[in-house]
Amino acid sequence: MRSITSYFRILIFAGISLYFLNWIGTSGDVSIFINQPWLWSIWGGLIFFHISCEICLAAISRVIYNSLNLEAKEKYDARIALKKANQFMWIKIYYKALLGSKNIEEESEIILDHNYDGIQELDNDLPPWWKYGFYFTIIFAVIYLVRFEIYNDYNQDEEYELAVAEAMIEIEEWKKTAKDLVDENSVILLTDASDFNAGKDIYLNNCAVCHKSDGGGGIGPNLTDNYWILGGGIKNIFKTIADGGRNGKGMIAWKNDLKPLEIAQVASYVMSFENTNPLESKKSEGEIWKDAESLKEKK
Ligand code: HEC
């Protein structure tokens, strides 16, 4: 114990055992350590056991060391010192091998026999790291050629289509969790029954007083025709509900009372009124709105 390597061993053991327990125990998205918190104590016990093993082993080697005679002790110490000194030797060896350069004492073997005002030239080999990199590019090129030029695996257009399709799936996934992040630019018509019913509830509780429960209009304008004062389409309707109508007309901004998702739901519900022609509806106001996607310019 108390040597740096023993601390490392304990850390590595702790990491591996945590990973391993988690890996066998977890089925599904949530880690078993969250579902079964008692497992932490098992993990702690394992680490404790490992630490005691380390302490015992260190104690045993200490006892054995002390039982050696002086000469054996010196021999042992010398071996340990040598091992320590050569600990990182392999890095140096690999580094040199990759450079492939000669020691300065051996330079006379590769010196070329010309001499320009005292400047001489060495005939070094190409450094191995460079050479192997070059061989790799050759192999890569052959595989690439066969795969894409001879067997026509896929071309850039297909790769692009694939990437777009994958991104679309990701966006769909994201939208499911990020419904509450919508604004007037990103809002889309919500068509799920649950969104429709939520929108209907919000409408009946907040909006029907002025727009009537069938959308035919009262204090507020008719929402069932194709005429819009502030712009039609889901985006404009979302914006009108969030930011309110023109000053002094009575349509307040709802963004402080309703969450973005709720505004999207009630806006989608309002969209469902289109062309329902309820009895006693209010006269059309505004202009026919054709472009369902664009946002109306601010006046
Ligand atoms: C106090 C009455 C009142 C309430 C409550 C009210 N509105 Fe309005 N709404 C109006 C008025 C008035 C206008 C017209 C605003 C204008 O002309 O600028 C309007 C405009 C609108 C428009 C735009 C119509 C167009 O032709 O461009 C929409 C969409 C709308 N309201 C939806 C809602 C929704 C959804 C709610 C509930 C969250 C709601 N309103 C609550 C009075 C109301």
Image: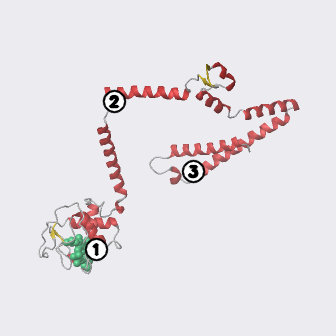
Q: Amino acid at mark 2?
A: Phe
Whether residue 64 is situated above or below residue 128 in the rendered picture:
below
Farthest-out residue, right: 70
Q: Amino acid at mark 1?
A: Gly
Q: Quick check: 170 left or right of 127?
A: left
User: How far apart in space, not on screen, are marks 1 and 3 (Cα)?
Assistant: 54 Å
Task: Point out the frontmost of discs 1 and 3.
Answer: 1
Q: Which mark is residue 39?
A: 3
* Residue at the image position 29 percent from the left and 42 percent from the top: 161
Image location of residue 210, percent across then percent down:
22, 78
Image location of residue 11, percent across then percent down:
64, 45
- Mark 2: secondary structure: helix
Whether residue 295 is situated above or below residue 150 in the rendered picture:
below
* Residue at the image position 51 percent from the left and 50 percent from the top: 32
Whether residue 194 is situated above or below residue 27 in the rendered picture:
below
Q: Neighbour class for label 1 at 10 Å: few (<14), some, many (≥20)?
A: some
Q: Quick check: 196 left or right of 83?
A: left
Q: Earlier in the sequence, mark 3 or mark 2?
A: 3
- Labels 3 and 2 touching (C-beta < 8 A): no
Q: Quadrant of the N terminus?
A: top right
Task: Point out the frontmost of discs 3 and 2.
Answer: 2
Farthest-out residue, bottom: 248
Q: Which mark is residue 254?
A: none
Q: Quadrant of the C terminus?
A: bottom left
- Mark 3: secondary structure: helix
Mark 1 lies on residue: 244
- Mark 1: secondary structure: loop
Mark 2 lies on residue: 148
Q: Earlier in the sequence, mark 1 or mark 3?
A: 3
Query: Does any portion of residue 235 appear in the rendered image?
Result: yes
